[in-house]
Image (spheres, rainbow, N blue to C red):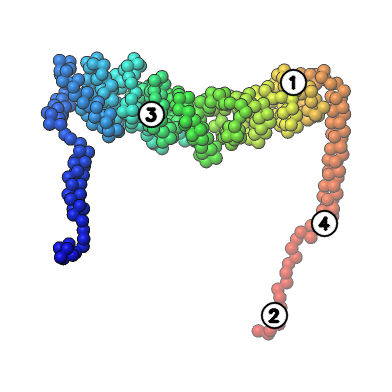
Amino acid sequence: MEIHRNPLKIPKSIFSAEDCCIPKMLKQILSKLPRKSPKSDPLDSAETNSCSNGVQSTNGGNSLSSRLSVVKRVSSAVFPASIMAGVEAVEPHLSFKDVTNPQKQNLFVSKLNLCCEVSDFSDPDKNTAGQDLKRQTLIELADFVSSGSAKFTEPAIAAMCKMCSVNLFRVFPPKCRSNGTGGETEDEEPMFDPAWSHLQIVYDLLVRFVSYSSLDVKVAKKYVDHLFILRLLDLFDSEDPRERDCLKTILHRVYGKFMVHRQFVRQAVSNIIYRFVFETERHNGIAELLEIFGSIISGFALPLKEEHRLFLCRALIPLHKPKSVGIYHQQLTYCVVQFIDKDPKLATTVIKGLLKYWPVTNSQKELMFISELEEVLEMTSMAEFQKIMVPLFRRIGCCLNSSHYQVAERAHLLWNNEHILNLITQNRQVIVPLVFSALERNTQNHWNQAVLNLTQNVRKMLCEMDEELVLACQRKLEEENSTSSVAAEKRKLTWERLETAAGFQTSAAYVIAPVEPATCSVAC
């Protein structure tokens, strides 16, 4: 009988437990759903009306304060989607003077989002009212940040980075490029961005933001990320020198504050240099990037990492190759000298690089190389100098004989440097024979009187240094000249014999004899 009533023998307790669990599960699910307050509808409608109609004066401060407090709670509850919702609930055209201190932070975010609309400056008569309103808002934001009242919470950091990204990050049109091979040239007039009146304030805000003493770097690095830095570096190709100057300050502050991004910044700048040297030879901001790296290199810890040595060998030294080196040569020399100051053994590497890229036909570039060489030699130790002195003074000997009088003058003036003269004196047995023949050729053949006078001074200096060595070099030079004269006379006699032998050939030998027509063996 029991089997017939319950053939599967399922205990009744299972059905009773299931009946009990279903209501509990429903309660748990329903309890997790957000509950809408019955009073939120009037508040939401009041916020919408205030955004559409505007706020009249500070008389409605109590109602505005209640709305802003609700917005603040909503913005802190959900991020970052709530930022826009919070800003929409605040009237951005209010002045910071018209709200209480707790409300200023929300108004700050609201004004930042208001400035995310990009104005068109290509047409001066287009959207003038909107441009004036945006500029006035940017000035208010800059004053508010400079007063120290701003608090860069996460919503404010996100809004600031978004506003800067929208206004600053852009692609430069190719038609604005110069026709030269290396960006701006020394004689080329710089181009100024018509939107600079707005961009300048945005850059000022960004500088103050990355320089803010109470900025939470752990939060800010989520928004000032690798992509933000890459797009910031792309702006260094701007043709407006004012913009590049602002970017130089910003990147320096970013490098100093965001330590987690330092290696990435160095690698990204290296990639820009590689592309410039080996592919395009076109970039407007190499001088500014090198100026930043000058201060970065001075802060390198000792001993230098292999990464830093590679940057010198693969980026800085090849920068001597492009034709436009004159635009950034001063900053490049400073970076190279900073490396040698950190590690004097790198002087040999630098001098080898200079000799590798030494100009052959560009006299102005050669003058820059000699000036840089003098600065490097001033920091070169005796041991490092001896490794490189033979190829170095062969090149200097060619400069002494240069037909360009400024190059020849600059090479002679190396002897006026006390440290270089000491290096030459200590190694005169090797160096004097390398340059003596060049000095002799100058005294006989050079066209410029100033170069002749400098040559006489250098010869006198060498005689005072070691007269016997100079006499020995002179005798050896005379022997070489006589030997070369004998060889030249032999060559001349050989050519004369060849010409005489060729003269015995009769003129008939050079005349083609007439060819008789071939007889046909077959009778026609």
Q: CA distance from mark 1 to mark 2?
A: 90 Å
| Residue 162, x across and y down, in percent | 33, 31
Which of these two is toward me, 165 or 275? Answer: 165
Relative horizontal placement of residue 292, taking residue 168 as reference (left or right): right
Q: Along the polypeptide, which appears first: circle 2 or circle 4?
A: 4
Is the residue 170 above or below the residue 503 in the image? above
Q: Which mark is residue 505?
A: 4
Res. 115 image quadrant: top left
Q: Along the polypeptide, which appears first: circle 3 or circle 1?
A: 3
Q: Which mark is residue 520?
A: 2
Q: Are marks 2 and 4 in contact (CB under 8 Å)?
A: no
Q: Along the polypeptide, which appears first: circle 3 or circle 4?
A: 3
Q: CA distance from mark 2 to mark 4?
A: 36 Å
Res. 453 image quadrant: top right
| Residue 6, x across and y down, in percent | 17, 62
Q: Which residue is mark 1?
A: 421
Residue sitting at x 39%, y 32%: 222
Circle 4 — which element? loop
Which of these two is toward me, 280 or 261? Answer: 261
Q: Are marks 3 and 2 in contact (CB under 8 Å)?
A: no
Q: Along the polypeptide, which appears first: circle 1 or circle 2?
A: 1
Farthest residue, direction front: 1
Q: Which mark is residue 19?
A: none
Q: Amino acid at mark 1?
A: Leu
Is the residue 278 above or below the residue 92 in the image? below
Relative horizontal placement of residue 490, taking residue 43 as reference (left or right): right
Q: CA distance from mark 3 to mark 2?
A: 106 Å
Q: Which mark is residue 219?
A: 3
The local crowd at label 1, few if under 14, some if 14 to 19, many if 20 or more residues have their Cα within 10 Å, is some
Res. 250 image quadrant: top left
Q: Amino acid at mark 2?
A: Cys
